[in-house]
Image (cartoon, grey):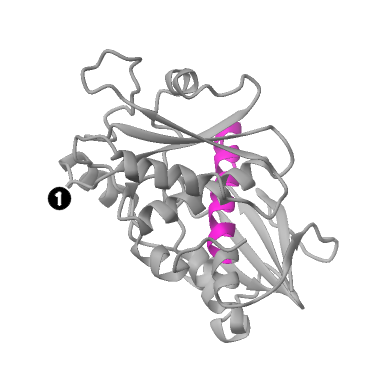
Amino acid sequence: MKINIPVQETIKKRNSVRSYEARKLSAQDKEKLMAYAASITNPFGVKVNFHIVEKDLEGKDVKLGTYGVIKGATTFLGVSVENTQLGLEAAGYAFENLVLYATHMGLGTVWLAATFSRDNFTSAMGIKENDLFPAISPVGYPAEKKSLRESIMRKAMKSDQRKPWKDIFFKDSFFNPLTEQEAGEYASALEMLRLAPSATNAQPWRVIKQENAFHFYETHNVNARPEEKLIKRVDVGIGLSHFHQTALENGLSGKFEKLPQDNIDILENTNYIISFKY
């Protein structure tokens, strides 16, 4: 289901916010945001759970730490999902839909996958024991001025830069780059995927166009830890949200499904995730 906002406009407007005004989300904005969260679906048939918690400004509650990465935020969103096939991709897809809606509301957010005290947030948000809890995001009103730490982080991660088309989009094989002309009416959907956020701005998605389908893959470094590989699956879900929601906005039809990969030479440290058949 398409999210009820101007998708491409919002994707281009979204940026990672790490410095916030030190005030709680208004009751009206909180109610509006969580009402929308309750309506969000995903095309993978996976139940995704959203959570929200407010940090006590007096510091009397459980310490909800973000290792100094976030400044001023008092309200946090979280996402959890059962450990099922495509669960992490569904979590990425659904949570990014919520992030985009928050952006449309004029609120700031930033995906956090590693830089938060997971045990404390697990307790505060009431995450089920066996569920996967891949990420949180502060949500609130962006501060007028970025903190020095935020400015340094953005520069170090090259947050505003994205890989060129030739490095992530391909035709028929990983050795033949896909042009925007060859992508046809799906060029804008791929471009919005290219702009998606990812942990450490790693951009782990790869896409092969083959006949009437796009195949989506996750790639990682040879020495990536198991938890890093899991987060990259969430990142792919974020990219799938951008791709799918843009396609829907442009009136394009199709569906996600697993398709045979027998005739594709998949690169080392690369995993097939799913395809979009149109």
Q: Which residues are magenta?
A: 221-243
> From this viewpoint, is residue 123 visible?
yes
Check disc 1 and report the residue beneath it: 144
Q: Is residue 85 left or right of residue 20?
A: right
User: In the figure, residue 104 lies in which quadrant?
Assistant: bottom left
Percent of width and height locating residue 252 = 64, 76
Quadrant of image for the N terminus:
bottom right
Q: Name the amino acid type tagged 1.
A: Glu
Percent of width and height locating residue 213 = 74, 71
Which residue: 44% across, 20% down? 124
Residue 175 is a magenta residue: no
User: In the figure, residue 10 lies in which quadrant?
Assistant: bottom left
Callout 1: SS: loop
Q: Is residue 32 left or right of residue 18?
A: right
Which residue: 34% across, 64% down? 13
Which residue: 61% across, 77% down? 251
Q: Nearer the viewer, residue 247 or 260?
A: 247
Q: Dot 1: within a 10 Å radius of its alpha carbon, few (fewer than 14), some, or many (20 or more) residues?
A: few
Which residue: 16% across, 42% down? 148
> From this viewpoint, is residue 223 visible?
no
Percent of width and height locating residue 24 = 26, 34
User: In the figure, residue 231 lies in which quadrant?
Assistant: top right
Position of residue 245 relative to residue 67, above or below, is below
Percent of width and height locating residue 126 = 52, 21
Give the main secondary structure of the magenta stretch.
helix
Q: Nearer the viewer, residue 142 or 226?
A: 142
Quadrant of image for the C terminus:
bottom right
